[in-house]
Image (cartoon, grey):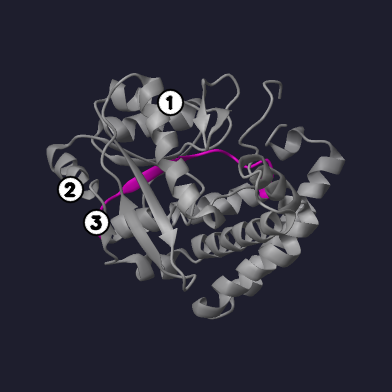
Amino acid sequence: MSRNPDDMSFQTKAAHFVANALARGLISLALALPYKNRVPIFGWVMAHLVGPLAGYRGRAKAHIAFIFPKKSPLDCKALATACLNNTGRTLIENYSARAFLDRLKGVPISGAGLGPMEEAAKAGRPVILVTGHFGNYEAVRAALVGRGYHVGGLYRDMSNPYFNAHYVRTMKAFGGPVFAQGRKGTAGFVRHLKSGGQLVLLFDQHVFAAPVLDFLGKPARTAVSAAELARRYDALLIPFYGIRQADGVTFDCVMEAPIPHGTPVEMTQAMNDSISARIRSHPDQWFWVARRWRPDSP
């Protein structure tokens, strides 16, 4: 589907316009609330209103049952609801960019990856930070920005161009350059990397024609581009996670040890193993709505 409104049918354009208007209205209402209230309220709205009405909870339940066949239907529903709650919280946190950056400034970053990244930055060596749609994937980036790093990112345009336009602005508000997937965006991404910068890549989405690798014990097509870029530009490849804590608004920011360079498939499988372990530890924090396991035909 084209992401340019001018290339869409009137019906598709109208549907996207209405959906965006509703989403922006909800976001604007939430942003008018104090931060401590807006995050749990928006999580509830996504979990109990938007998610079920949009069919997201049903899709998440099906994916959860696929990976955890021993879970009861009630347990799958509860986990899907928790997943949507985290999704809503993440969305409004990212729209609260300044407040979110202030809250993450000075937050400790644990794990074996921060030291190597600091050394790489001093040496002018590029770093690729890889994660997935887990917890809040912007938490560690915000913590690094608070330490003075200029962390960029590569994103995939959303199918709704009206919503995509303002969501991209929220990503830019975190301070680092962001690049859209595609020839122009990738060129800017590579320039930033070659200059010794730090860049974030989310890798837990299905990519047609990508190699089939293990993901949560099931075969899933996974792009090896992050590993290829790391090898090509001698960049560190570091998995990282912003794990939501029990209070629902704070995070354990973790940067794991860099993945050793090997073949792109070996490195990418190590990335899959890393996030799979995190998902199994905190299954409510992964975005089960995504069509991670898909047939080969679009």
Q: Position of residue 293 (x, y in %)?
A: 63, 33
Q: Amino acid at mark 3?
A: Gly
The quadrant where residue 27 appears: bottom right
Q: Nearer the viewer, residue 123 or 239?
A: 239
Upstream in sequence: badge 3 or badge 1: 3
Q: Position of residue 283 (x, y in %)?
A: 54, 53
Disc marking residue 225:
1
Q: Nearer the viewer, mark 2 or mark 1?
A: 2
Relative to 64, residue 236 above or below: above
Q: Nearer the viewer, residue 289 or 191?
A: 289
| Cα–Cα gap, marks 3 and 1 | 27 Å
Mark 2 or mark 3: which comes first in sequence? 2
Q: Over which residues does the magenta segment extend? A: 147-162
At 53% from the left and 56% from the top, the residue drawn is 285
Horizontally, residue 164 falls left or right of residue 103, namely right
Where disc 2 sits, the SS reads: helix
Q: Which residue is mark 2?
A: 115
From the image, tell me which residue sits under label 3.
Answer: 148
